[in-house]
Each structure stands twice: as structure tokens, then as C-alpha cells.
Image: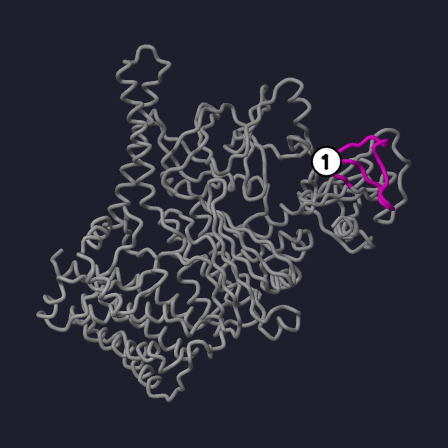
Amino acid sequence: MNDDAEIVAEFLVESHENLDQLDRDLVELEQNPGSRELLSSIFRAIHTIKGTSGFLALDRLERLTHHGEDLLSRLRDREMVMTTEVAGVLLRMVDTVRALLDLIESSGGDADESVEIDSVIAELKRILATPQDAVPVEEPVAEPFVETVVHVVAEPVAETAVETVVDVVPEPVVEPVVETPDEVAARLPVPPTPPATPAAPSAPMEPAESAEAVAEDDGTATRRVVDSSVRVDVELLDGLVQLVGELVLTRNQIMQRTDVGNTDTDPDLIRAAQRLDIVASELQENVMRTRMQPIGQVWAKMPRMVRDLSLQLGREVSLELEGHETELDRTLLEALKGPLTHLVRNSLDHGLEAPAARVALGKPAAGRLHLRAFHESGQVIIEITDDGRGIDPEKIAAAALTRGVVTRDALARMEPRAILDLIFRPGFSTAEQVTNVSGRGVGMDVVRTSIERIGGTVDLASVVGKGTTVRVRIPLTLAIIPALVVGQGGERYAIPQANLVELVRLEGQDLAEAVEVLADAPVLRLRGRLLPLVGLSEVLGEPWVKAEPLTVVVVQADDVHFGLCVDDVHDTQEIVVKPIGRQLKSLMMYAGATIMGDGRVSLILDIAGIARERALVSPDEHVDDVRAAAVDSSALLVLEVSNGRRAALPLTAVSRLEEFALDRVERSGAVQVVQYRDGILPLVWLAAAIGLTASPPPEEQLSVVVHEDGDQRVGIVIDRVLDVVEEAVVSSDVGRRPGVLGSAVVQDKVTDLVDLDAVVGPLLVGAR
């Protein structure tokens, strides 16, 4: 690359950084029109771009920024005040500058008139020509339409290059505000005033103060800061990561062959291998850190987007950003930009009400949108929360039926949470008309698919009238992850550590007591909780035979836990994730592959995929209605409740099955209770709750189904558990009454379908 090309490349990178900061500063200035600090920062950034574009003979860019600088100068001199109209014109100028920079990057210049600037310049001139009374700084005049509250503003990172900084001091950017070569030479000995960066000083200097401060410095500090940082192309970093991955694999192979337990190994070779292990680990950690970028790079674009979209939709929004310093792999960060943008747009369009509607509901006129990022259990958690109308399951159900996303029979058997998950189905939308914001039924399904493609998950919680929270979980990196290596059928498989909960080994009496069978489905009773058991051999297509001793790896997929039975547990390793071939991508149980220390390939298990395939969680958006109906119907626990009468509960509503001695039953007011797990468990007799005559009281033990709702529990007293159904059932309105949704033929017998909310709702309300 020649010198001119290097100068242009540096100019483009720095200008893009300045534009990202300009978006945030202009939105904030709209809310605080009297801020001298913000005005000085914005003015210096535009001044820098204008000066450098003139030096590089980028005439159209210079002409556009010159007019923008005129308007900013009037604002800075208090001859004008910032209004929504002025902010909109300045933001349009920033967008046009960004388009010109893209044009320069692709063609090497800005002469191509495919980017139109005359209309923007005309708007700037019109604003400048419009008479406006100057207003003192102490008297804000612009009524904030979009209130952007940023707890900590993240430092942006260039999208096309990564800056590795040795010192914590930000690198100043030289302002070549030059018109002739002679003036360039005259300016070189004196370091110019650096423009504002995202890490702006707390007390910004005026131009005169800046020149004086620089004049007192001999330039040593500036050179030291510049010398302490270097820009590295991301392709070079990606290549380093690949090489480190291969080094880790080689390290694993050498460590396996120099096992300290092998007495034939040369002691010097063992020491060298241990040293290699330490150096490779440190190198891996440092190289991985160069790929890590703060999520503030994504957060930085949110204030501008929220501001523009809220104006378009007629909303008032208070935006709060938290956790900008949370870091994750650059590849994941790039993959997250689209899904997060769609989730924020959804919150504004579907979640937050119009100001008048909010006031009528007793809410503040400005809706609250809170974006939060943090680390938890080796993952990055991102939450998008609004205090809007929430998601109404009835509205979702009606829209799903209208659009043919689900059948009426399948919908009748769905729990409220499963109904909410319908928004992730392809083609689903609740919008009554198509707009440029929403209504085409394309979005949430792409969000989930995009996030799952990078090893993450997405789920939501919503309360009607209160708001919605969407939670996204993603790994820190996709390159090298810690994993547990297990054995099955002579082969080894890797389970990502992020999915691990605990290891359980059962034998003898413990095995007999802990493992039960419900309708031919094994379950593990672990500390009073029932967990489904899945044999890894069964997942791989072989029959599972319960062995003794039994090794169970307790894993989690989203909020569902289950036990994975394996032959052996080897050890934990840091594995390098390799993509699997297209021939295996259709198999839900594999997330990738890795090379072990002995050079053999091992497959990485996809715990969420196994859970979906075994119907342990709600089916995702790609399964058809027939399979959805089968999954819903299989999740029924059939009970005997009164003199042979049968009832059924959704299995998803059952937390545990317990038995209590009669002498443990006490009273609290009109409610019968038992002491249970350091708390009090209220009891409801199911027969009485659904209008049946209770059976004669048992002689010794009460059979109880424990239902949990958040941190509240209710015990449902039954006669006994009969079975878990595995057949399709069709509900009818026959037998509908308080506590009963209707009836169905289950295993050739008429069975009441329990209305769980009606049965346990009063006790849960009382408990709260």
C-alpha cells in the first residue's frame, strides 16, 4: 500500500469512529441543547473530517461538512438553539457523510454522484437562513421527545479494524485542517488539538485553551501515547486465532503422550511439555483477548435508532443502556447486531404504547426501554426490557390461527408459555397491516435462528400490561471452549461446559431409589426433583440399557434440566471448535467437532438440540403442526382423583411427585398445609376443586403433585398417578365446568382436562 492509500485508510477508520460518536452526541444534545461540552465535541469531529477531506482533495465531502460546520458554529456561538428539526438535519448530514465515506472506500474518491448531497446542503442552508432567537444556556427550550439515558457510554471500535491499546490513554487523532502544502509544513512541529473521542475528557478545553496546553508540551506525551497503540487488520487476528487453535490441539497431543504417570517418559521432556502447556495457555488467552470487543459497539448505535424510530411511531422513549463494557468475541458481536436491532424495533413498535395511551393507563408518558448485558456462568446474557403492554397469549393464539401457524386442536393443548413461543414461528405476526417497521411475519423466527446459529438461545417473559423481557444467552467465543469429554460405545463426545450442571453416579440402593419409570419413560429423582433421563446411546440410535453403576451428566437447555446417561466420563479439556460437514448439519444432536489429543475426531453434542429432539422442551419454529400436536398431547399426567374418576394435568406443570404422612398436615386459617423444603406448602384436594366427591381418606399417605409458579408452590392432592400419555388426544367441551376445561378420551377412557389456573390460582394469589 502506498503512502496516500495508507493516509486514506487511516482517515476512513477514524472518520467512521467519529461518526458513531456523532450519532450519540447529537441525540444527547437534542435533550441537553445548552451543553457546551457536547457542542464542542461535535464541532471538533466535523471540523476534523472537513479539514482532512480538503487535504485529500475530497471536494464533495469537504463541501458538505463545511455547511454542517457553519450550522454547528452558530449553535456553539449561541446564535441558534438545538431543536428536533435542527437535530434531524444534522443527523441526515451525518448519514450522508457516512455514505460518502463508504463510496471513498469502494472507489477511492467521492466524485461519483450516486451519493446525493445537494438536498442535504439545501436543508442546512434553509436552517441557517431561518430566523431564530438565541436562548441562554440556562434556559432549555427543546422539549425532549426521546430521552436517552446512558449510564456509561461505550468506546466504539472500528468495524473494519481492531485497535490493540497497550496504554489506557486514548490515542489522539491529528487534525490536518490544512489548505496548502506550506501550511501543512507549518503545522507539523506543533501537535494539534485532538478531536473528541468516545472517551472524552471530563473537562473539554476550548480551542484557545487547547492550543496553549499543547504549546506547553514538548510532544513527548503525545508520541508516547501514539507509540503505545497499533491498528491490526482483523484478518491477521483471525489468522492468529486459527494458529493458536492448532497450537492448542498440538499441545493436547503432546500432553497426552507425556503423561506424568508414564515412567518411560523422559523427565526433561515432561518438563518441556509442561512449560509448553503454560506458554500455550497464556498465548491463547492473550490472542483471544484481542478478538474480544465490548458490546458498547452495538449499544452505540441504539440511541440514534431509538430516536428516529420513536419519532416515526409517535412514541416517547427513555432508553437506558447498561453493561457496555461486557466483552465477547468479535464474530459473535457482528452476528448479534441484526437480531438485537430487530428486538429493539419490536419493543418500540409492539411493546411500548403511545404517550396518550400510557397516560390513560396511569403510566408515565415516556416508555422505558432498558438494554442490559452481563456475564453469567461463562456466557453473555443480553436482556431487552420494556414497560409496555406486554404480550397477550390470547392475541397471539388468535393471530396464530388466522395465519395458519398452528391448528386449533394443537392450540387448545398448549400452555401459555408455549403459546408465547409461537411468535418465533415463521410467518407469524400480530401486526394488522404491513408497514416499513413490521407486519410481514419475518423477524422473530430469523432472530432465533441467527442466535442459535452461534450457539445461543433466546426466550422471553411477559406480563400483560406490565411489559416484556427478551433474554438472549450466547457463549463468550466460538473458537475455543471448555468442555467435558464423555465416552459412549467406545467413542468420545464433548459437552460444552456452559450446559453442564453436575455429575451424578448411582449404584446399589441409591440407584434403585433414585431412578423411577413413568409410562416407560425413566426419570431421576434428584434432591426431590424429577428429571427426565436420556441415554446417550439412545440419542445415537442404539437401544439404551440401564447399567450399574449409572453415570448421569445433568445438563441444561434454556431453563429445562435433564440427565444424560453415558458410559464413561473422561476429563475436561479446552477444545477447538470445528464446523461439521453439511452431511451432518441436519442432525440436531451435534453442534460441531474437535480434534482430541490423540488426533481422533470427536463430535460436540448440542444439548438444546437433544432436548428438542427428545421433546423435553417446546418444539422450535421449524417443526410442523402435526409434530407440535403430538408433543403437546404427550405431555399429560393421568391421575385418579375420585372413586376411579380420571383427570389429566399437563406434565409441564408438574414439578415433583411427593407423598406425605397424614400427621404432617396442619392448618393455616382455612387452608391445609404441610411443612415442605424449608417452607409451607398449601394443599388443594383436586376432587373437590373440580366438583367431584372426594374418595375415602387414605390410611397413611397423601399422594401430592407439586406445582410451582415462580417461587410459589401448591400441592395438589390426588388418589394416585396412573400414567403419562403418549397418544394424541382431542379435547371437547363435554364436562366443562369450574376447574375443568373439558374432557378427552385418553387410553380409551373419558378423562377430565384440569384447568390448572382455576384450581391453584386462588392459593397462589393468597401465597403472594
Residue type, numbered disc 1: Asp
Provide residue 347's location: percent of width, then percent of height.
53, 63
- Mark 1 lies on a secondary structure that is loop
Q: Residue at x 40, y 60 (%)?
A: 300
User: Viewed as shown, does residue 550 lie left or right of 495?
Assistant: right
User: Viewed as shown, does residue 162 lie left or right of 757?
Assistant: left
Q: Is residue 485 inside the magenta stretch?
A: no
Q: Compare residues 765 and 739 and report the one nearer the observer.
A: 765
Q: Compare residues 351 and 535 and report the one nearer the observer.
A: 351
Provide residue 423's location: percent of width, then percent of height.
56, 58
Q: Compare residues 528 and 127 and report the one nearer the observer.
A: 127
Provide residue 557's location: percent of width, then percent of height.
54, 41
User: Viewed as shown, does residue 673 lie left or right of 590?
Assistant: right
Picture quadrant where residue 41 is located = bottom left
Q: Main secondary structure of the magenta part?
A: strand
Q: Please determine whether, in this image, residue 170 is positioned above or below residue 614.
A: below
User: Viewed as shown, does residue 360 lie left or right of 214?
Assistant: right
Quadrant showing the N terminus: bottom left
Residue 99 visible in this rendered orientation of the protein: no
Q: Please determine whether, in this image, residue 526 is positioned above or below residue 382.
A: above
Q: Residue at x 66, y 54 (%)?
A: 416
Picture quadrant where residue 590 is located = top left
Q: Is residue 678 inside the magenta stretch?
A: yes
Residue farthest toward the left in the current orientation of the protein: 182
How many callouts does the rendering have? 1
Q: Residue at x 58, y 71 (%)?
A: 365
Q: Please determine whether, in this image, residue 476 is positioned above or below residue 321.
A: above
Provide residue 39's location: percent of width, then percent of height.
35, 71
Q: Residue at x 24, y 46 (%)?
A: 236
Span colored in magenta: 657-681
| Residue where numbered disc 1 is placed | 678
Could you classify mark 1 by the number of other residues whose Cα lies within 10 Å: few (under 14), some (14-19), or many (20 or more)? Answer: few
